[in-house]
Image (cartoon, grey):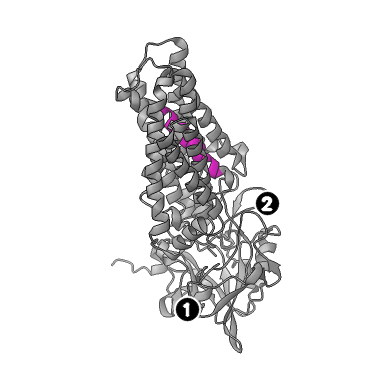
Amino acid sequence: MAETLTLHQVAPVRWAKVVDHTRCIGCHACSTACKSENQVPVGVHRTYVKYVDVGRFPQARRAFQVTRCNQCAEPPCVFACPTAAMHRRPDGIVDFDKRVCIGCKACIAACPYDAIFINPEDQSAEKCNFCAQRLDVGLEPACVVVCPTEALLVGDLNDGTSRVSETVGRDVVAVRRPEKETQPKLFYVGAHQATLDPIAARRPKGGIFLWSEQGSVPHQVTSGHPRTPNNAAAAILAYDVPHRAPWDWRVSLYTWTKGIAAGAWLVPALLVLAGVLEPASPLWTWAAPVVAGAFLVATGALLVADLSRPERFYMVLTRPQWRSWLARGGVILSGYGTVLALHALESVLGVPPPSWALLWAGVPLAVLSAAYTAWLFAQAKARDLWQSPLLPPILLLQAFIAGASALAPVAAFVEPEAVPALLWIAAGATLLHLLLLAGEVTMTHATAHARLAAWEMTSGRHALFFRVGVLLQALAVLAFLAAPGSGVAILALAGLLAYEHAFVQAGQAVPLA
C-alpha cells in the first residue's frame, strides 16, 4: 500500500513573509534589529518603515508600510545580474554573493521595489535576504523576533499549517506592483493603498519630511508624486528614506559613445555594400575602424568606471550569467571590437580590400552593438519609460546619426567626396528621430510610472537636457537644408547627447518604494 505523504513532506520549503499593518505601530524595531544583525551601515537600509498621513484634519491618521525585498519567485534582479551574484536559492530566498558582485547596479535598476543598494563599505550590492543565516539554523529573522506586536510573520508557504500559509490562504492580502509579474512572496495585510503605491501620496512641500529633508542631493530620487498623486484619497508622505538613481551620467554618455562606435563602422560598411563608397576608400579602410575603435574603447572605459567594483570587470566575461543582457552585451562588444581590430590590421598589412567575410560578420555585430542596450534597459523592469518595443530601432537610428556625424569631419580631410552622403544620412536620420520624439510629447504612455517619467523628461527635472537636445537636432536639420557643412554633424551629435542624458536619467526619476 503506497505511503500517503503530506504536502510539507512532498514540497520543498518556500519561505514567505506577512506584514500585518493592522498591528504595525511604526516603531522601527525591525529596522534597528536588521541593522544590528546584518551590520548594515548608516545611510542605507535592508528594511525600513514608511509613514503616510492619510485624510484631512481632524479626520486624519498615519499609515505605515514596512519596505524590504519582496523575495520574488520571478526575480528581475537575478535575471539582470551579469555574474549570478544575485541568485535564488532552492527555498525561494533571493540571496546575494558579494564575492562575485561587480557593482554594476543592474539589479538595482531591475528591482521594481527599490529594495537593493550598494553597501558604502564594501561597494557590493546588498538587500534583505530574510536573514537566511538565521533561517538555516532554525531561527527566525531578527525583525520577526523583535517586533513587539507580532506584525511580522515568516513561514513556509508550502506548509498548510504555518501561520503565513494560513494568512495568505484565508485573509485579504496585497502585494506591491503585481503588474510587474514578479510573484512577490511579501504579503501585506491591512495596508493602505497610499503606502503600497509609491506615487499614490504627494510629496511634502519643500521636500521636508519627518526628521529629514530630501531633494537637495544630486542624483537623488525624491519620494512621492511631484504633481497629482495616483490616489483619490488625501495622502501626504511624512517619512521615507532617501533613494538614489543607480545609473548616472556615465551610463548616459556610454549610450552616446556606443552609438558612435557602432555607427562609425556600420554606415561606411553599408555604403560599401551599396556601391556608394569604393572598397579602397580611406574612409572605409582607415577612418571607419579607427574612429569606431576609439569610441568603443571609450565605451568600455565608461562601463568599467561605472562599476562600484571596477577591478572585477573581467567577471562579466569569465563567469557570465547568460540571461543578463549586460553579460550578453559584453560578449557582443568584444566580438565587435575583434572585427574592428582585424579590419585595422588588414589596413596596416595592406590586405587588398575588402575582406568580405569580415564585412558580413561585422555588420550584424555592429547592429547588435547599437541595439542591445534596448534589451538591457528592458530588463530594468522597474523603469517603465524604458519598456518600449520601439527602443531597438530607435537606438539603431541613433547609431546612424552618431556614426555619420562623427565621420563627416574626418571625411572632410581624408575623402571630401564622401561628406555629402554622410551629411544626408545624418540629417535624414535626425529628422526621423525628431518625428519619433514627437511621440514623447503628444502621445500618452501605458502606465502611470511611464507617464510620470515622460513628464520628468519633457517638463520636469530633466526638461532642460531634453529641450536642448531637441532644439540642437532641429537646428542640425535646418543647417543641412540651408548650407550643408560640418556644423550639421556637430549640432546633431550634441543634440543626441543631450537627449540621451535626459532619457536615461528620466527613466530613473520615478520613486519605486
Q: Is residue 82 visible?
A: no
* Sooner in the amino-acid sequence: mark 1 or mark 2: 2
Q: Which residue is mark 1?
A: 232
Q: Nearer the viewer, residue 382 or 313?
A: 382
Given the current orientation, which residue lies at the most extreme front position? 482
Q: Nearer the viewer, residue 139 or 107?
A: 107
Residue type at mark 1: give it.
Answer: Ala
Label 1: element kind: loop
> Magenta segment, which residues?
251-266
Q: Which residue is mark 2?
A: 120
| Residue 217 quadrant | bottom right
User: For the residues carrying marks 1 and 2, which lies nearer the camera in this image?
Assistant: 1
Q: Is 110 situated left or right of 393 in this image?
A: right
| Residue 421 quadrant | top left
Q: Is 501 situated left or right of 25 in this image?
A: left
Tell me the number on the disc at residue 463. none
Q: Residue at x 51, y 78 (%)?
A: 192
Give the x, y percent position of residue 390: 36, 49
Give the x, y percent position of residue 50: 60, 71
Give the x, y percent position of residue 234: 53, 80
User: Marks 1 and 2, Cα distance to the nearest angstrom?
Assistant: 39 Å
Q: Nearer the viewer, residue 313 or 318?
A: 313
Q: Is residue 504 visible?
A: yes
**36 drawn magenta:** no
Residue type at mark 2: give it.
Answer: Pro
